[in-house]
Image (spheres, helix red, strand yellow):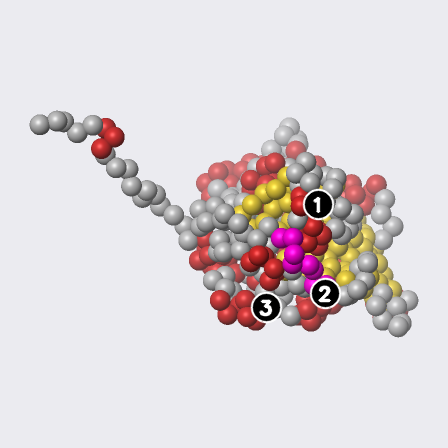
Amino acid sequence: MDSPSPESIFLEDFGQKVDLTRRIREVLLNYPEGTTVLKELIQNADDAGATKVCLCLDRRNHGTESLLSDKLGQWQGPALLAYNDAVFSEEDFVSISRIGGSGKHGQAWKTGRFGVGFNSVYHLTDLPSFVSGKYVVLFDPQGVYLPNVSASNPGKRIEYVSSSAISLYKDQFFPYCAFGCDMKSPFHGTLFRFPLRSADQAASSKLSKQGYLEDDISSMLVQLYEEGVFSLLFLKSVLSIEMYEWDVGMSEPRKTYSCSVNAVNSDTIWHRQALLRLSKLTDSNDSTVDTFSLEFLSEAVNDSHPQKRTDRFYIVQRLSSPSSRIGAFAAKASKDFDVHLLPWASVAVCISDNSSKVM
Ligand SMILES: Nc1ncnc2c1ncn2[C@@H]1O[C@H](COP(=O)(O)OP(=O)(O)O)[C@@H](O)[C@H]1O
Ligand SMILES: [Mg+2]
């Protein structure tokens, strides 16, 4: 009798797998809806070193003739656009494609840590996408809208510059032509597009049963404006957050609100980046208390009575270098608990009388 050959042994695929849609549902349970999603986007932009963030409710309906797949037509409607002026590195592309695997370990000055915050955008959409540098990326965790996707391969990255993607698939890529992105040359920034999940799409979605209307995004932007100063207070790089609405038939979005650090100078930047500086010092026993004041300018542009107001805050941050005694303790803790810590704490107090500062 012949002995069995190695080829006769069938290796059945049997690896451990994660159900991505289930993992995303779990993430959404831990992230409240509302401005939390916007704050996660702002925080990621800040970690990436961006100085400007623009959030835009795009009310337009885009063409559906030249798309990567017919099924994508239903995502050409109203969307939230989120722009910032920092570009993804290759490491960033890898990191955003993993859930729960932040590439920011060992970079203690960055706020992101757990590699999940971005996924809060699945509150709004089933099909998040973005353009950064020379790439456009589309995620489709359910594997139902993009061509040639599957549970094990739930997204696409396209090098749009050399592939002339915009001339072949004009309707697909035209919605990203905003905030300086032309889909022809590499984009020196990042532009996310989150087409809103309609009630019909929510009914069959495996990610969320919650639909979003344009008005929901509009109110979310107003709410962020009202909390505006507080979202900027402890950031390191971002100096301004602007909000826009892009109305049907218009060639440009119109600015509705903005919130920015006023009178920026090298001193302001030096203080805001103290944590970044200190985390790089290895041979100092520094443990310092840093104090400074910051003035914020908030503007509401959309009303018939445009409003401006300034708020001044006094900020106190206590920082310890990783090599100081307390720093060494934290470094040990970070090894034990797999959390990278830099001991620091910040508090801020408003020192302006708002009622008298409304201009
Ligand atoms: N300019 C940018 N704007 C927004 N996100 C960016 C930018 N550059 C890189 N990113 C990436 O976005 C991802 C954010 O993912 P997130 O789930 O919030 O995890 P983290 O805990 O690492 O912040 C990170 O992988 C980060 O590298
Ligand atoms: Mg983050």
Earlier-in-chain disc, 1 versus 3: 1
Please, what is the three-letter code of the amino acid marked with disc 1?
A: Ser
Which residue is pictured at 68% across the width and 54% down the height? 171
Q: In this view, does 259 lie to the left or right of 90?
A: right
Earlier-in-chain disc, 2 versus 1: 2
Disc 1 and disc 3: Cα gap in Å? Answer: 29 Å
Q: In this view, does 265 lie to the left or right of 53?
A: right
Which residue is pictured at 67% across the width and 45% down the height? 168
Q: Give the range drawn in magenta.
A: 60-67
Looking at the image, residue 324 lies above or below residue 118: above
Disc 2 and disc 3: Cα gap in Å? Answer: 13 Å
Residue 223 lies in what quarter of the image? bottom right
Which of the numbered marks, if any, corresponds to residue 59? 2
For mark 3, does the 10 Å Cα neighbourhood hold few (<14), some (14 to 19), or many (20 or more) residues? many
Please, what is the three-letter code of the amino acid marked with disc 3?
A: Ser
Pointer 3: what residue? 198
